[in-house]
Image (cartoon, rainbow, N blue to C red):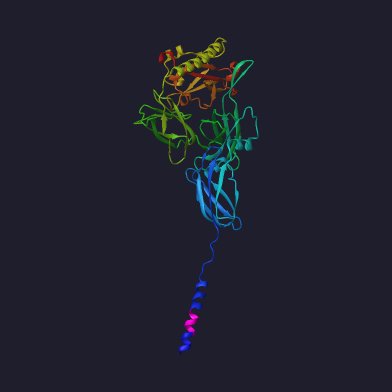
């Protein structure tokens, strides 16, 4: 018995040692940390909210995800040794109609790896869509998607038009033209209009069948890339609702503001305690304008859905009179009126100057044209009246030029886009053969030219 215990005692240490060796853990695999940034080169800003995904190249079912912070930073910890693909998703990519680039990452050491990712620059996107162009006079690009106001679905085969003003100096002096760019949406609803001017306003409209947008003003950025979807809706049903507030730059409610929707006959309202409400509007992308005495007018582009109402708050900047502003405006007005008088002396067309306007004291735009030869005022549900041209075949909507720029007024409702109190001079060409070249839109219905400014009685 004693020898047996002794043998067991002598053998015990070796047994314990064997057990200890059996439970010793294996060395941990190497782990790395991937960090980086997501940057939008087209908009020159960090792409916060981007979804970054890291995919194992050997096993694509293994996916790691991170969300970029407001400053575009992201981090993915504890990444094992191996080869990976990394990319990102963001709504901005959908707006531009491009795919995010993929990057290959090889991890061999447990170090921190920096992976910067970017959306291509505006110049790269323009070149890819439109070609290299002329480096001496680079042009811009307007792209977006056409969607339906009722279903929000993308609309294929819709027509999109963008018009802008172009001033050239040639043998005939200063000439003003209003060229247009046209395009059609693809099967996925995307449209591309190459050749628009950079850092300049354009008037855009989309239409498909009986549906359309309103006429809206957009400004092409300095980098030449304009991105803005267009929503088309019914112009007849009038189910749209738009509400909001009109405030000053300091946040104070403006109680005396007038809010109207461009191109929507009879749709206008005054603010109450700074709030406004417009009902029975055409749906789709529209442009709302707010005006108030002592403030600069402001226009805002809004998307009016077919079911739920839309909200658009408008901030007006106070008019600040400065010596430079008065001088520049005086020069511009003087030049316009000099050209106005020069055309009046030719004897073609009808001309109304500021003295005649003061004598007429027009409330609505139609009041200006009631005694003009060749003009017919169509009355309807709205008190303003529609300004039309008379012809052998009846009446038609004339081409309208506001301060030299051709604007679309297909229903003849001039009050939807201008205020009679701000009109300083008017030219009417009821015969297409007498229309000056710069005001000839070839619509076969004559032209109306309106010049705005402060009349003498209002200075």
Residue 401 placement (x, y as % from top left) = 53, 22
Could you say where residue 11 lies in the image, as x and y percent from the top left? 50, 81
Q: Nearer the viewer, residue 279 or 336?
A: 336
- Residue, x 58% and y 35% (percent of image)? 159
Q: Position of residue 230 (x, y in %)?
A: 53, 37
Corner quadrant of residue 157: top right
In front of the other: 187 or 4: 4
Would residue 411 be counted in the magenta stretch?
A: no
Magenta range: 7-12
The residue positioned 41% from the left and 30% from the top of the image is 315
Which residue is depicted at the point 50% across and 75% down?
A: 17
Residue 457 visible to the viewer: yes
Q: Quadrant of the C terminus?
A: top left
Q: In terms of depth relative to the viewer, which is nearer, 264 or 326?
A: 326
- In the rendered image, the residue lying farthest to the bottom is 1
The x, y position of residue 194, in whole percent, is: 61, 33
Which residue does the image show at 65% across and 31% down from the upper left? 133
Q: Is residue 207 left or right of residue 253?
A: right
State whether residue 206 is above or below residue 31: above
């Amino acid at each position: 018995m004693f020898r047996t215990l002794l043998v067991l005692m002598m053998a015990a240490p070796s047994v314990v040692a064997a057990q200890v060796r059996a439970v010793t853990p294996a060395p941990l695999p190497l782990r790395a940390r991937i960090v980086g940034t997501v940057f939008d080169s087209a908009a020159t800003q960090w792409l916060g909210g981007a979804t970054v995904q890291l995919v194992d190249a050997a096993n694509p079912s293994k996916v790691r995800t991170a969300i970029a912070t407001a400053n575009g930073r992201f981090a993915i910890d504890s990444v094992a040794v191996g080869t990976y693909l990394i990319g990102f998703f963001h709504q901005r990519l959908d707006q531009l109609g491009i795919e995010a680039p993929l990057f290959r990452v090889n991890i061999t050491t447990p170090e921190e790896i920096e992976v910067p990712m970017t959306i291509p620059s505006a110049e790269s996107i323009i070149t890819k869509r439109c070609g290299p162009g002329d480096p001496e006079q680079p042009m811009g690009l307007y792209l977006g998607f056409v969607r339906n106001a009722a279903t929000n679905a993308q609309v294929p085969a819709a027509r999109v038009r963008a018009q802008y003003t172009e001033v050239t100096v040639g043998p005939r002096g200063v000439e003003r033209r209003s060229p247009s760019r046209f395009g059609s949406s693809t099967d996925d609803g995307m449209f591309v209009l190459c050749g628009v001017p950079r850092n300049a306003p354009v008037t855009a409209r989309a239409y498909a069948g009986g549906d359309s947008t309103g006429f809206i003003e957009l400004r092409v950025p300095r980098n030449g890339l304009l991105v803005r979807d267009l929503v088309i809706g019914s112009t007849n049903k009038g189910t749209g609702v738009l509400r909001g507030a009109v405030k000053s730059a300091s946040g104070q409610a403006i109680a005396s503001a007038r809010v109207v929707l461009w191109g929507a006959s009879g749709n206008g309202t005054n603010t109450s305690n700074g709030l406004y409400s417009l009902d029975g509007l055409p749906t789709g992308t529209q442009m709302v304008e707010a005006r108030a005495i002592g403030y600069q007018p402001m226009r805002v582009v809004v998307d009016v859905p077919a079911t739920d109402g839309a909200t658009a708050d408008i901030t007006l900047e106070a008019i600040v009179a400065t010596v430079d502003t008065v001088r520049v405006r005086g020069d511009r007005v003087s030049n316009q009126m000099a050209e106005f008088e020069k055309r009046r002396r030719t004897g073609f067309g009808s001309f109304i100057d500021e003295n005649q306007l003061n004598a007429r004291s027009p409330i609505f735009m139609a009041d200006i044209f009631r005694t003009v030869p060749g003009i017919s005022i169509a009355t309807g549900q709205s008190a303003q009246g529609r300004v039309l041209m008379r012809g052998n075949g009846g009446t038609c909507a004339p081409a309208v030029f506001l301060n030299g720029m051709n604007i679309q007024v297909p229903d003849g409702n001039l009050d939807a886009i201008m205020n009679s109190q701000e009109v300083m001079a008017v030219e009417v060409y009821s015969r297409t053969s007498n229309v000056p070249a710069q005001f000839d839109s070839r619509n076969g219905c004559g032209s109306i030219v309106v010049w705005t400014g402060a009349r003498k009685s209002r200075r």
